[in-house]
Amino acid sequence: MDLHGGNIYKLKRENGVELLDYSSNINPLGVPESFKKAVIENFETLEKYPDIDYVELRQSIADYNGCSIENVVVGNGATEVLFLYMKAVKAKKVLIIAPTFAEYERAAKAAGRDVKFFPLSKDFSLNENLLMDFITDEDIVVMCNPNNPTGKFQDLEKIERIADFLENRNKKLFIDEAFIEFVDGWKEKTAFLLKHKNIFILRALTKFFALPGVRLGYGLTFDEVILNEIRDIREPWSVNGVAEIAGKTMLLDNLYIHETEAWIKKEKIQFYEELKSLKGIEVTPTETNFILIKLLNDDAKSFRKKMIENGVLVRDASNFMFLDESYIRLAIKDRKKNEQVLKALKKVLPE
Amino acid sequence: MDLHGGNIYKLKRENGVELLDYSSNINPLGVPESFKKAVIENFETLEKYPDIDYVELRQSIADYNGCSIENVVVGNGATEVLFLYMKAVKAKKVLIIAPTFAEYERAAKAAGRDVKFFPLSKDFSLNENLLMDFITDEDIVVMCNPNNPTGKFQDLEKIERIADFLENRNKKLFIDEAFIEFVDGWKEKTAFLLKHKNIFILRALTKFFALPGVRLGYGLTFDEVILNEIRDIREPWSVNGVAEIAGKTMLLDNLYIHETEAWIKKEKIQFYEELKSLKGIEVTPTETNFILIKLLNDDAKSFRKKMIENGVLVRDASNFMFLDESYIRLAIKDRKKNEQVLKALKKVLPE
C-alpha cells in the first residue's frame, strides 16, 4: 500500500536520504507545545484503558463544534470513522464525486457497497444540477470539501441544495471535511451548520494540529440511526489515550490555531502566485493547504523522480479517478521550505 | 458496553470517587521511564503518518520473539489483531474453549462465523482428549493461555498435541497469550516455539508494560496465507505513532522487565496464600496476574457492590460463559494495594 503516493519511510529505507515531504498535507507549524505539555503531565493516564465511551474527549469536540456530545463519534484516525460509516449505513450504492481521496471507494467496497463516480467539471468545479440529474438509485453521495486533491471548496448554499435534494429522496450525504480548518472563515462555512439529519461530516483532527501520528478522527451528525449503529459495531478502545489527551487540549489552544490560520492565509496566496509564474505547469486555485498542478510537458512519474533527485517528494496524482499522468499535488508548508521547493521546481521545469 | 465488568470512568462520573481498580489486570509498576523518555525525545515523529508497513516496530517485536519480521503483524491493541484474524481466516465454525475472554466470540460473530464452546473441566483444567473427541466440523479452536479469567496455564506438550491433531485435520489453533509474560519462564513456554503453521499467537504488548492506553497488540504466525490476507484487509495507519515509540523502546527495557518479573513471582504466591486463608471464598491457583474467586455465601453482584463501598472495584465474573453468579476476578497489584484489598475483603466476607 502506498496510499499517500509517497511512502517516505520506504523511500528513506531504499535511498538512505531524508526528503522534503510535499506529498502529505500536514501543518508545518509542528506539534503544538500545549500537546507536549499535556502528554508529559498525563503519562499515568496511559496506565488505564481509555474511557470506552470517550465522554470527555467527545465533550471537547462537541464544545469546539458547538453541538451536543450525542452528535459526536470518535475514531482511530478519520480512516476508522469512514470505514465504520460505510459499514453502518443501510445502502447498496454509493456515488463518489471525483477526482477525490481513494479511501472512500476502498471503505465502501470493504463494506460490500457498489460504487459509482460522478465527475467534477473540467475546471474541477461541481455542477450541482448535473449531479442531481445524474443521481438515480444511489443511496449515499460522498464528497470531500475542500476536495483532495483539487483544493476546491463548495459553499454552503450549494451543499444545502444538494442535501435538500437528497433528503427529499431519503438519501444521505457524506462530507469529508478533513481539510476544512485550512479554509478562511471555515466556522461559518461547514456543512454541519445545516443540521440536516441526512448529513454526516468527517473530520481529521490531527492534520490541522500536525499530529497525524496520533490518530484521531471524528464524525458529526444529527442522524441518530447511524450514531446508534456505529456504537454497536465499533471495536472497543480504538482511540488511544494519547489521542484522548490531544483532543482534550489542542482544541483549546487558540494561540496555535491563530498562528496556523495566519500562516495558511498568507502562504496559500503567495505560494500559488509563485507557482503560477513558473512555465510548464498549470496551477489550480486552492482554498486549503495543498495545490493540484498539471504538468504541460512531462508526466507525473518522471517528474516525481526528478524532484526526488532534487530532494523533494511530490504526490503523483495520476492515480486519482479522472486524472491522468499529467497531474501532481504539492503541499503548502512554511516560507523557507516552499522556497526550497520553488528552487527545485525551477531546476526541473523547462526555462 | 462494559467489557471489563468495571467501567471505572462511568463509576467515577456516577459516584465522584476514585476506586482501587482490581477489575483490570495491568502491571502496577506503571508507565516505564524508558517510554516517557522516548516519547519526549520523539514528539516530532508524530508530525508524520506512521510507517504504513511498520518495519522498525515489527523488527523490534521480531527481535524480542526471536523470529523474522515476516512473522509479525501489528494492530491497534490486541483487539484489532483479533478482529482482523477472524475476518481473514477461511472458516465457518469457531470453537472457543471457555470460560474465557468474551471478545473472541464478538470478533468471530462480527466476521460472520458460527461459534461453539468447549467447556473446561470443573477445576478449569483442559482435558485435551475430551477436546479432541469433541471437535467435528470446527475450523478453528480458540484458547487463551494463560486463561482469562481462570489464571490457568497449559503447558507446551499439551498445546503441541492439540496443534498436531488440528494440523492433521487442516484446522487452526488461535492462542491468545496476552498475559503470558506474567508466567514464570514464559520464553520457554510460549506456543510460538512450536513453529506450527496452523498456530496464530495473539499478544497484547501494553499489559505487561502498563500502557493499555497506548493500544499496541501483535500477532505471530508462520501461516503466510493469513499474513497476506490480513495485510490486504487491514485499515491503513491503525497503529499510532506513540505505540510505535513504545514498541521500539520498551521491549529493550530489561530493568523494567526484570522488576516486573520479580514482583509478579513473589506477589502471585503471597496474595494467593493470603486470599486462601480467608473464609467464605474458594481461590483458583493462578500462573498470571489475576485470580478467579468463588464466593461461597454471596453473589457477585452484591459482593461487587459491597467492595465498591469499601473502595475496591472487583470484576463480576458471572457473565463469563460457564461461570455463574458466584464468581469474581481480582487483579494482583503491588503489596500495599493488595493489603488494602485484603482489608476490604475481611470487612465484606463473613468472619
Image (cartoon, coloured by chain):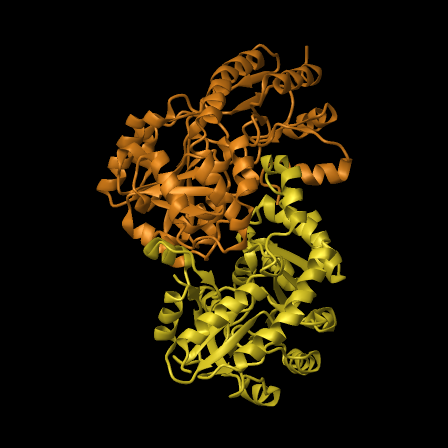
Chain colours: A yellow, B orange
| Quadrant of residue B347 within the rendered picture | top right
Quarter of the view holding residue B306: top right
| Observer-nearest of B235 and A225 | B235
Q: Whole-percent x and y of residue B69?
A: 32, 44
In the rendered view, tell whether residue A29 sits above or below residue B181.
below
Q: Across the whole image, how many numbered discs are drawn on residues?
A: 0
Residue A195 visible within the image: no
Image quarter where the N terminus of chain B lies is top right
Q: Position of residue A201 (x, y in %)?
A: 63, 67
| Whether residue A335 is visible | yes
Q: Position of residue A8 (x, y in %)?
A: 42, 58
Q: Nearer the viewer, residue B328 or A128?
A: A128
The residue sitting at 32% across, 25% down in the picture is: B188
Foreground residue among A291 and A153: A291
Task: Please state if A307 lies on the left or on the right of B304 as rendered.
Answer: left
Relative to B19, say whether A73 is above or below: below
Identify the residue at horizontal 47%, vertical 55% (top origin).
Answer: B237
Q: Quadrant of the C terminus of chain B?
A: top right
Q: Using residue B268 as the reference point, say whether residue B64 is left or right of it.
A: left
Q: Is residue B314 left or right of residue A326?
A: right
User: Which residue lies at the image location 51% right of the left edge and 55% below the top edge?
Assistant: B48
| B160 is higher (above) or lower (below) than A90 | above
Q: Is residue B293 above or below residue B191?
A: above
